[in-house]
Image: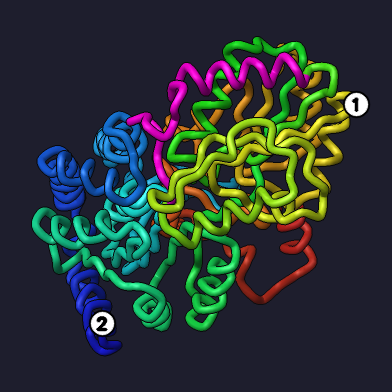
Amino acid sequence: MQADVITNQVNHLKTTFSSGITRDLKWRLAQLKQLKLMLVEQEAAFLAGLKSDLGKSEQEAWTSEIGFVVSDIDHTVKHLISWAKARKVSTPMFVQPGKSYLLPEPLGTVLIIGAWNYPLQLVLAPLVAAIAAGNCAVLKPSELSVKTAELLALYLPQYLDQNAYQVVTGAVLETTELLKQAFDHILYTGGEGVGKIVMRAAAEHLTPVTLELGGKCPCIVDSTTDLTVTAARIAWSKWMNAGQTCVAPDYVLIEKSFLTPFIAALKQKISEFYGSDISKSKDYGRIVNARHFARLTSYLQDQDVILGGEMDVDTNYIAPTLVLNPSADSSVMLEEIFGPILIILTVDKIQDAIPLINSKPKPLALYLYTKNTQFEQQVLSQTSAGSVGVNDGMMFMANPSLPFGGVGNSGMGAYHGKFGFDTFSHLKSVLKRSFLFDVALRYPPFSASKLKILKKLL
């Protein structure tokens, strides 16, 4: 796509925003309902696209992509009018008579750059928030999920106002050109390296950013846990989408004495979920492309693979794989795995997991499985993560009342539910005063008596 085409697209959206049409709450609600209608009417096409791109089963694709966004839209439609109202705050005595409030207003024209692993959800969920807040938006789906990007470019203009919402497809050149534009906010989901590029580009225009990155998400398994349920929940959260999930557990920390029963329970759940020949399971996904397949297979060189390791280069298939105690300087321990490889690290006592986690960059998610409430509080108070799941994996994503976002290297800013509305809004401070009781204390000429009274009031 030519540079001037992208510039014209962005300028057109800015003109639309300046017209004021997106500020109308009825218009916003209508756009949100149209977005839901698109997902309902074109469900079969999107399910086929997700199957083509990532081998996602129908249930997994619907639950984590289509159903997720539909639920987000329903929640937003239900609460939008209350979110958009002025938010009253207290007014100090020396400013009385008057009233103070925060007035949400849209930022303007925003850019949403999605990721390939959940190519529908990670574009449309931020869009829901952007629409709700009254913005125009450019959507840049990932070029790696080819079919889903094509479907978004095809269907979104058929359902949403093209004067307010545009899809730009393409790869690095198109993204680079988009980042040259002066947006009012950028939300990027992806890796740390590109996140830095986005942030540098945004700085040229003093554009605020929300970065949803990733990192190595730890999973602590305490010996007091319910082992059967724990194994099921770890297996589900790790091998959904063949492990290509930013909040999937990256490595498990477990006491040496509890390793054998844990491995046995995990193997049992993997077999129950995907059968004896996982390559033939309709419920197990595939790696997105050959480059990521090669990256993942390289992690297994010279490692102690205690389960899995089977692969098929022709179909980008890698079986659920367990690696035991890799060296700290190996690539599998230094890089985010983002695939179906789960590291198992043993410790002498479970409390040793805390300093090990703290020696690494802050993760997007941390998981703890335990019945020991004292240890639970110790982990919560002594570690940092974007989100924490206690006794389950990834389920905090299903609660629209919880913000989703990282901390430190795993990202900045958050969205979902009201937090998404606020991310794409400016909370404008407003103080309205009466003309009555205009006390002259603040006006010149100043005096010692005026100062004495002011000191008491302030």
Instruction: Examine the rendered structure and indicate whether residue 90 appears above or below residue 115.
Output: above
The location of residue 97, given as percent across then percent down, is 48, 49
Residue at 76%, 24% in the rendered image = 377
Is 349 rendered above or below residue 31? Answer: above
Residue at x-position 13% and y-position 61%: 157
Q: Which structural element holds mark 1?
A: loop
Mark 2 burial class by Cα count in 10 Å: few <14, some 14-19, many 20+: few
Residue 263 is left or right of residue 5, and the answer is right
Residue furthest right in the image:
348
Q: Which residues are magenta?
A: 259-287
Nearest the eye: 307 or 176: 307
Residue in the foreground of this view, choosing between 110 and 453: 110
Mark 2 or 1, nearer chain start = 2
Magenta residue check for 361: no
SS assignment at label 2 = loop
* Relative image position of residue 307 (x, y in whole percent): 63, 31
Instruction: Assign the N terminus to one quadrant of the image.
Output: bottom left
Residue 211 screen position, x and y as percent = 52, 59
Which residue is depicted at the point 43% across and 31% down?
398
Left/right of residue 440 with respect to residue 18 in the rendered view? right
Q: Which residue is mark 1?
A: 348
Indicate the quadrant where residue 425 lies.
bottom left
The amino acid pointed to by label 2 is Met
State the predominant SS element of the stretch in magenta.
Answer: helix
Colouring = rainbow
For the question of whether residue 94 can be seen, the reply is no
> Residue 40: which quarter of the image?
top left
Residue 1 tag number? 2
